[in-house]
Each structure stands twice: as C-alpha cells, then as structure tokens.
Amino acid sequence: MSKINELAEKYYDYAVEMRREFHMHPEPSMQEERTSKRVKEELEKLGLEAEIIAGTGVTSYIKGNGEGKTVALRADMDALELEEENNISYKSKNGGLMHGCGHDAHTASLLTAAKMINDLKGEFKGRVKLIFQPGEEIAEGAKALVEAGVLDDVDSIMGIHVWNELEVGKISVEAGPRMAAVNQFIINVIGKGGHGSMPHQGVDALTAGAAVVMNLQSLVSREISPLDPSVLSVGIFKSGTRFNVLPGKAYLEGTTRCFSRELNDKFPEMIERVASETAGSYRAEVELEYNKMTLPCTNDKELAEIGQRSAADLFGEESLAHVEKTTGGEDFSFYLAEIPGVFAFVGAKNEDKVEYHPHHHPEFNIDENALKVSSALYTKFALDFLSE
C-alpha cells in the first residue's frame, strides 16, 4: 500500500465526519456562509492561510520544499433546493435544501486531501492551490472565481465529481469532452391580440410560437452534423388567457447542449434566424435572450494521462473505467477555458450498502468509501503533476 493510500485510510473517519456535517447543513448557491467558515477553520487548523474570495469561496496554498509549478484542486460546496427524503442520522437540517448531488463529498474529500498533502509537503516542489467553490448548481461560482483571478498563478487544475452511475472503486479520467455546454434561451413572440372569432384582425402569437417550436427542431436534425452531438429542447411554452381571445404574446423557454465550442458560439445566431423568420411568416416578431450557463467541459489529453496513471498507481489498472460523455453541465468548464485541466468521475455506487438513486433525487446518497478514493486521487494527481 502506498503512503497516499495509507493516509487516505488514516483520515477516512475525518472525511466521513466532515461529509456528514456538511450534509446536515446544506446551503444554497452563493450563500454558503457556514460551509465557507467551516472550511476556513479546518484549513487554519493545519497551519494554512485561507482566503475568502468571490463572496463565499475559499482558497489556500500548500507549499512544497522548493520552487516549482502550481496545481489547483477544486471542490464545489453548494446544495440543491430539494427536500431530503433519506432516513439517516445526518439528514439535512435545513428544510428545502439538500446535498443531492455530492458536493458535500467533494468538500470533505478536498479537506481530507489537504491534510494528506500537508503531511507530504516535504516530498514535492511547487505549490498546491486548494479551491473551494460556491455556486456550481447555478453556474455562477466558477465564473466569479475566474474573474477574481483565482487561476492567475495556476498551471493546471483538477476537479472531481462523485458519480452514482459508477461503482465505488472505479474512476473515469478520460481525455476529450466529458460534459456539455449548457445554455438557456428565452423567446418572446410578439403579435397583436384580438377576438378569437376574427383572427384576421390580429396577429396570432400562439400559432407563430407553435411554428417556432417545430422549426427549431430542424436545427439539430438538418443544420448540425449527426457526428456532432447536440440537443435543442423547448421546455416551456405559454400563450393565451381565454378560449376566445386571440393571443398577442407567446413565451418559449428551452435549452441547448453541445460538446463543441464552435457550435456553442453559433447556436444563438441559428436560433435567432429560425425564430425571427418563422414568426415573420405569421406577421409576428420575436425577442431572443440567450444565456450561456456553462461551456463544454473538455479534458486535456496529457493531464488525463497523468490522472489515469495516478488512479492506476493507487488502485490498479482495473480501477479505470469508461464513462460516456454526458449532456449534463459543469461550471468547471470555465476553468478549462482558461488553463489545461482534468475532470474526474469517482464511483460512489454500491447497492449492497446504499440504495441506488440518481443525482438530484431526494433520496440520493453515496457509499462513503468514495471519499477515500477521491481524497487519494486529488493528492496523487497533484504530486504527479508537480513531479512532471
């Protein structure tokens, strides 16, 4: 057993304790006041200086025994607006809030890795920067930290997500696209109201909006290569107030997903063109609001190789698993747009111990052995990168 594995075993109880504490006290995005305070306290117990950044973010450095590169390790801290239905001793104490995605595990794992790296600081040169990030669930935290300069002195970065679609003990650290760009579009269709019995006197926004919904589907099926995975879905369509009133307005809201930065940049123009020209054929007009929430999350090839080697050294080649890229999003992508980095999925599923539920489910829970894997992987990747 390597020294890192031994330290992960040594601090496992600490990792569980911290994870359960955070689980009991979930906080909403960009309001992680208690969590931020506790993280800072735990880092200061190690003799580290901790800085509050971008409201509730926390950063700290662990310095090695000489000058060298700087590698960052990131964990997100926010919870979901979700009522927990688990019957566990560490159930959420904050009504309507729950760590239903695993961010409690990420925060606990990185705090545990901080203890491990601090114990090993005589064995590497350079610095490890710890980043505890707020607001991942609303895709605001990473952007705020980047704008605050959190990456200005960093050469590479790793993020980890515990993953309930993967068995505990398995790790996916693969090159290329891992998670999709997530965007929101809002289309207001503007017509002219009137009496339902005399539609020629108005401009029917409902019919125009319905045509916009249908024609938008042709973007993915007819304008985008079938070899370039993408999604366009309309999730909200509202129009009309009464059976015999011709609607003068319609409201559409939807999402796009893709793995290509080039396509991600083209989507707004494509949607604007189809929506305006379609509505125009019905004498209506449109107003488009397009919000880029996350970018494509794409792993650097060389860093993915380091991550795979780190995982194999710790847990054997059999620990490496393939996880297909997902159309879910991650604001870790904003770090990857600035510097090389890698995002790893760490298995947390074990139906012999914990009933399986997907992420964002009110009964979501994990096999806490995943904390041991995550803290060890954070540590090993950091030291392996700094020794390159």
Image (tube, grey):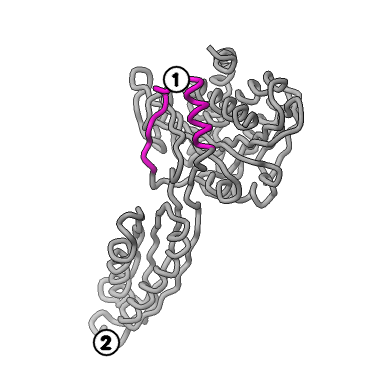
Which of 207/136 is in front?
A: 136
Q: Quadrant of the C terminus?
A: top right
Above or below for 332 versus 228: above
Above or below for 74 versus 144: above
Above or below for 60 versus 193: above
Q: Main secondary structure of the magenta part?
A: helix
Residue range (magenta): 303-325
Q: Residue furthest front?
A: 388
Secondary structure, mark 1, is loop
Residue 12 image point, x, y percent: 55, 16
First in sequence: mark 2 vs mark 1:
2
> Which of the 4 image quadrants contains residue 263?
bottom left
Residue 305 magenta-drawn?
Answer: yes
Q: Which residue is mark 2?
A: 200
Secondary structure, mark 2, is helix
Residue neighbourhood size for the residue with mark 1, other residues' Cα within 10 Å, grouped as few (<14), some (14–19), many (≥20): few
Q: Is residue 88 left or right of residue 223?
A: right
Q: Residue at x 37, y 18 (%)?
A: 353
Q: Residue at x 40, y 34 (%)?
A: 362
Q: Residue at x 69, y 21 (%)?
A: 123
Q: Given this view, does label 2 or label 1 mark the residue nearer the observer?
A: 1
> For the residue marked with disc 2, what is the amino acid?
His
Q: Which residue is mark 1?
A: 316
Q: Residue at x 45, y 44 (%)?
A: 176
> Which of the 4 image quadrants contains residue 222?
bottom left
Residue 121 image point, x, y percent: 70, 22
